Image (cartoon, rainbow, N blue to C red):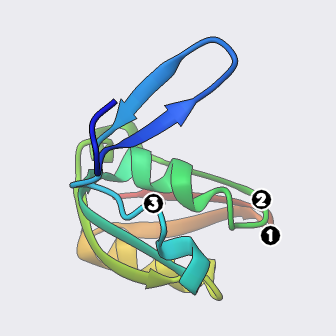
Amino acid sequence: MNAGALYKITSNSVQQLDNHIFDYSSWTEGLLSVRNMPIKHFLAELSRYHRGFIKCAPNLDDYLVSGVFQLNDTNLILTTLARTARAKVHYMTRWWAEIRP
């Protein structure tokens, strides 16, 4: 292990994390802070704080997200992401949202 590096440690593995894409400690401040993270991975992180199911259309999977997002309103985050990706949030139900063009 290297000083200053971040690691994910499970009972089966040790994986070094890329701390240039995601600020792993920002959630303690109620924030989600990312740099050039593919939207697919961003939504996977956001889903930890959002009630319900979130996904995006496959053709948006590689859209890169950068910014600092307040976790107190995850629906606002989805709306903001959709606008920047020139897409829309479609709610199949109150608990199921999809970002698609």
Give the residue type that dot 3 points to. Tyr
Foreground mark, 3 or 2, reads 3
Quarter holding residue 1: top left
Q: Residues within 10 Å of mark 2 (few under 14, many from 20)?
A: few
Instruction: Determine the residue positioned at 54% across, 48% down.
Output: 44
Q: Which residue is mark 2?
A: 52
Q: Secondary structure at mark 2?
A: loop
The mark nearer the N terminus, 3 or 2, is: 3
Foreground mark, 3 or 1, reads 3
Residue 94's disc number: 1
Query: Residue 89 appears at what percent x and percent y?
Result: 51, 69
Q: Residues within 10 Å of mark 1 (few under 14, many from 20)?
A: few
63 is higher (above) or lower (below) than 83: above
The mark nearer the N terminus, 3 or 1, is: 3
Give the residue type that dot 2 points to. Gly
Q: Nearer the viewer, residue 97 or 37?
A: 37
Q: Secondary structure at mark 3?
A: loop
Question: In which quadrant will I find the C terminus?
Answer: bottom left
Give the residue type that dot 1 points to. Arg
Q: Nearer the viewer, residue 65 or 87?
A: 65
Q: Check contact, mark 3 vs mark 1: CB within 8 A.
A: no
Query: Residue 28 appears at what percent x and percent y?
Result: 59, 77
Q: Which residue is mark 3?
A: 24
